[in-house]
Image: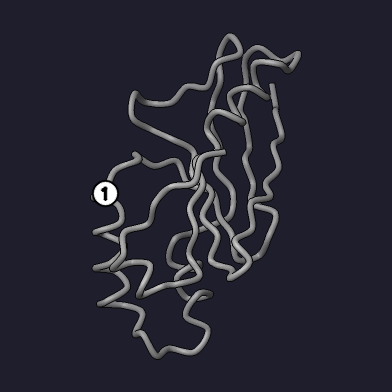
Amino acid sequence: MTSIEVPYSIAAALPTLSVMDITNEVAQSVARSERRDGIAYICATHGLSLVRVQERETGFFEDLECLLERVVPGDAPSRERLVHALLGSRTEQVPFKGGDLCLGQWQRIMLFSLDAEHRTDWSLTLVG
């Protein structure tokens, strides 16, 4: 699991945010499994965490910053829950073939935690 540095402007606007790259862990679990082809369901197990397949680049954080400025005011009660709802569900589905994840060249599986405790727990279900 690799921690991803969150730009200062985002960290200041949403201090409870932490982002972890879990791509390697998911890929290793898929490779070790008996299933060769199918779909990997990666789910954040905490209510204020979510999983996203995303390119690991600063443009995403710039877009997130704009979203926060326009849609979720800094003084909004339960701001983390509003951001979580805007970012979507807690689960991502990634196909795999021959024991390898089918991701684009720059795509990574990211675990976002909006909890002050920076949760890093997730689950993996393989179907196929």
In the displayed image of the protein, which residue is found farthest to the top?
A: 98
Q: Residue at x 25, y 59 (%)?
A: 63
The quadrant of the rendering that contains the N terminus is: top right
38 or 21, nearer to the observer: 21
In the drawing, does residue 19 fall left or right of residue 33? left
Looking at the picture, how far across and down is residue 67, in whole percent?
Answer: 29, 69
Q: Residue at x 59, y 68 (%)?
A: 115
Question: Is 123 placed above or below 96 here?
Answer: below
In the drawing, does residue 93 fall left or right of residue 67? right
Q: Residue at x 67, y 46 (%)?
A: 122
Asked where in the image residue 9 lies, by quadrant, the reply is bottom left
Q: Residue at x 71, y 16 (%)?
A: 32
In the drawing, does residue 91 fall left or right of residue 58? right
Asked where in the image residue 74 lies, by quadrant, the reply is bottom left
Question: Is 94 placed above or below 36 here?
Answer: below
How are the colours assigned in the image?
one colour
21 or 49, nearer to the observer: 21
49 or 91, nearer to the observer: 49
Of helix, strand and loop, which one carries label 1? Answer: helix
Question: Is 43 placed above or below 100 here?
Answer: below
**Circle 1 residue:** 58
Asked where in the image residue 8 lies, by quadrant, the reply is bottom left
Question: Is 89 placed above or below 4 here?
Answer: below
Looking at the picture, how far across and down is residue 10, in whole percent?
Answer: 33, 66
11 or 28, nearer to the observer: 11
The quadrant of the rendering that contains the C terminus is: top right
Looking at the picture, how far across and down is residue 65, in whole percent?
Answer: 28, 66
Give the amino acid at mark 1.
Answer: Thr
Looking at the picture, how far across and down is residue 51, in whole percent?
Answer: 54, 49
